[in-house]
Amino acid sequence: MNAHYIGLMSGTSLDGTDGVLVDFSSQPLRVITAASEPFPSDLRAELLALNAPSHNELHRAALAANALAAVSAKVVKRLLAQAAAQGIAPSHIKAIGAHGQTVRHQPQRASSSPSGAGYTLQLNNPALLAELTGIDVVADFRSRDVAAGGQGAPLVPAFHQGVFGRTDRTVLVLNLGGISNLSVLPPPGSGPVLGFDCGPGNALMDAWCQQHTEQPFDAGGAWAASGQLIPSLLANLLDEPYFAKPPPKSTGRDLFSLTWLAQKLAPFAAHRPEDIQNTLTEFTAAACFTGAISYQKNSEELIVCGGGAFNLHLMRRLQAGLPTLRVVTSSAHGLPPLQVEAAAFAWLARQTMNRLPGNLASVTGAAGPRVLGAIYPA
């Protein structure tokens, strides 16, 4: 059985596409090579705009999906060039798992929908990607879980269990992308794997940083660290009903949008931008460690992946909020932070190609395990 798969991930941070080539023939899996491609500024701006209703959005979304496929193809081309040096030909790749770019996530609409189903929408053109690469593409992973009554997210906890799970301890894994999500991985036989979206990850911090420093993100969290906490703003940010909802739950820019942020910040316009950045970072940390606190029993550490793992100030605030745990990046367990989610979608593509379930009903709330995704043959 061909054990080589490519995983592609472009997350809520809208910074670009990360890709990995994974060999699943050994345990643990082996990432053979990794590559990334930043989004052109106009594509990033368009993807951000398409998160809200706008003029001519169907046409614009189709063009953005084509552009996204072109970026993905560049990542695949780079991965294949690097793999060729190791004797791995394109014919050795079984499939590409391409997540696409989420622009709407509304699983909760099931109660008001005539069909009884919510929806989730990831911009993508997997047919074009298959045409450009000559490799089978698996895409649209979330829809089947939503159709089965689930949240459609997060889908990574099953992968996290295989990579980071232990037989003697509960392991907590926090992904800090644009949105943050937590995986709770108990030892086998001691309870179900759990997972949920905590709330904002990098998205709001990055937006504020871009607005005031013209930098795409707060490198190392240095700007936030230069500011002071605004306690009343922190309380206002945390006064969001989503945080009180029990799992299963998932969220995205549909809720934590720039409009949401502007409304929350309106009474605090006189404060220094760096103080607001400090408070947004504390808000992100609080949303994450509040979600993790009740699951830290029998656990020793919080493993952090995603771009937020490089925000040193945020990592310090997570450690302060979870003093009984070691807060470490996924690199400490052999998988760099920017490779974890892409590797997860390579794993999901493998599940699909082998007609195996990719979701966990204990995480998403779906009616049961489902084979996820749609296959676009080369």
Image (cartoon, rainbow, N blue to C red):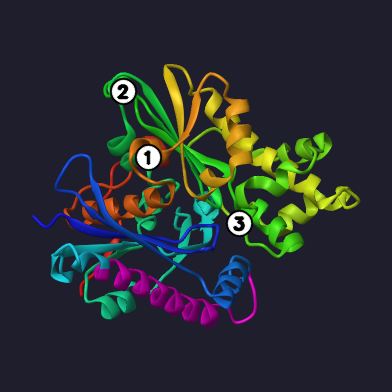
Mark 2 vs mark 3, CA separation in Å: 34 Å
Tag 3–tag 1 contact (CB < 8 Å): no
Is residue 68 shown in magenta? yes
Q: Which residue is mark 2?
A: 187
Lower position in the chain sequence, tag 2 or tag 1: 1
For label 2, the SS is loop
The structure residue drawn at horizontal position 26% and vertical position 66%, both measured from the top left corner, is: 82
Is residue 296 shown in magenta? no
Which contiguous range is marked in magenta?
A: 53-81
Q: Look at label 2 and name its amino acid.
A: Pro
Q: Position of residue 370 (x, y in %)?
A: 28, 48
Q: Nearer the viewer, mark 3 or mark 1?
A: 1
| Residue 42 image-quadrant placement | bottom right
Residue 325 sits above or below residue 30 on the image: above
The structure residue drawn at horizontal position 22% and vertical position 76%, both measured from the top left corner, is: 134
Q: Position of residue 32 (x, y in %)?
A: 25, 55
Image position of 231 (left or right of 345): right
